[in-house]
Amino acid sequence: MYTIKRASEMVGVPVATLRAWERRYRVVNPGRSESGYRLYGAGDIAVLRRMQALVASGWSPKEAAAAAASGESNLETEPDVQRDKPPRSKSAPRAGAETVDLVAAAAGLDPAAVTRLLDEHFATGSFEQVVDGWLLPELERLGRAWAEGGVSVAGEHLTASAVQRRLSAAFDAAALNSGRSPLLLTGLPAGCRHELGILAFATAARRQGLAVIHLGADLPLPDWLTAAQRHRPDAVVLAVPTPSDVAPALEIVEGMAGRRALVAIGGRHQDAVVKAASRLGSRSVVALGHDIARAASLLRDRLGPL
């Protein structure tokens, strides 16, 4: 029997998503320990894995739950059904759910509403669909609202902390690949603390089968070089969310010159870094674009077979 934390790791979805699937779709009915904790059997894990595979391929969670629970979810034997279910570009809360958005929850200093919104959305699609279709656009709105005075510093911090915890849980739950998988170092240059985008990318990259060591925010150049020397990654991935991050990101690009690692840049100001690196003669720097699913796939293809 497995605890919910272990089940989360085995299935590859956050604990909160498992709870939401059970509550909303009755996909499995785990037993309970004497202390009241959920306990999952091998059959439960198999059903949840089938549901996760279907959701990741574009099925709605409701349909995926029904198919997974009935055993009718073999992706290899149902190609026509899959083609009839295009991937969702946006996630949305279930019908009847409260319509408070993330900015309103932040403005109201309402942690329960933030948690409820995250639960609702992450239960309606794959990690990548939810992040690209809802979470990152909402975080941009939140940043604008804070800059305009509509959300307090406390509200912004409260919401960002909740999102970071959710992304960190998803990162930990994703498979930790090693061995022959290409290795990425992900993080932010010195002075940069806007970590949510790069953490979301690191999670998507793990879910694509890449090995990822996430170094976090505000990492000085000497520490980047030490980590690269220690781990010899196939690629170093930086985010450049603000104009002030361009210069320290360029320092890292220059510091990585002569190493075999590709340097990949994401974030709003990625093009400025790539253009400046090109003027400096660097040919091993690429822009990742602004879609984490596409960026992770691009990097996986660029680095070769797993």
Image (cartoon, grey):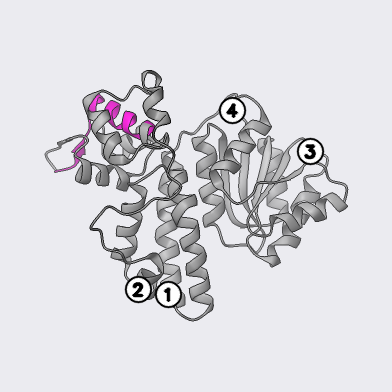
Could you say whether the residue bearing mark 2 is in a helix, strand or loop?
loop
Could you say whether the residue bearing mark 1 is in a helix, strand or loop?
helix
Mark in front: 4 vs 3 = 4
- Please rate how many residues cluster around mark 3, counting C-alpha atoms within 10 Å: few if below 14, some from 14 to 19, many from 20: some
* Cα–Cα gap, marks 1 and 3: 42 Å
Disc 2 to disc 1: CB gap under 8 Å:
yes
Confirm whether the magenta stretch covers residue 148.
Answer: no
Could you say whether the residue bearing mark 4 is in a helix, strand or loop?
loop
Q: Residue at x 33, y 40 (%)?
A: 60
Give the magenta-colored segment's residue range: 36-53
* Cα–Cα gap, marks 3 and 2: 46 Å
Q: Main secondary structure of the magenta part?
A: helix
> What numbered label is drawn on residue 109?
2
Q: Residue at x 58, y 42 (%)?
A: 294
* Cα–Cα gap, marks 2 and 4: 42 Å
Three-letter residue code for mark 1:
Ala
Residue 150, can we see it? yes
- In the picture, residue 165 is in which quadrant? bottom left
Residue 1, can we see it? no
- In the picture, residue 59 is in which quadrant? top left
The residue pinned by badge 1 equals 154
**Which numbered disc flags the more N-terminal residue, 4 or 3?**
4
- Please rate how many residues cluster around mark 1, counting C-alpha atoms within 10 Å: few if below 14, some from 14 to 19, many from 20: few
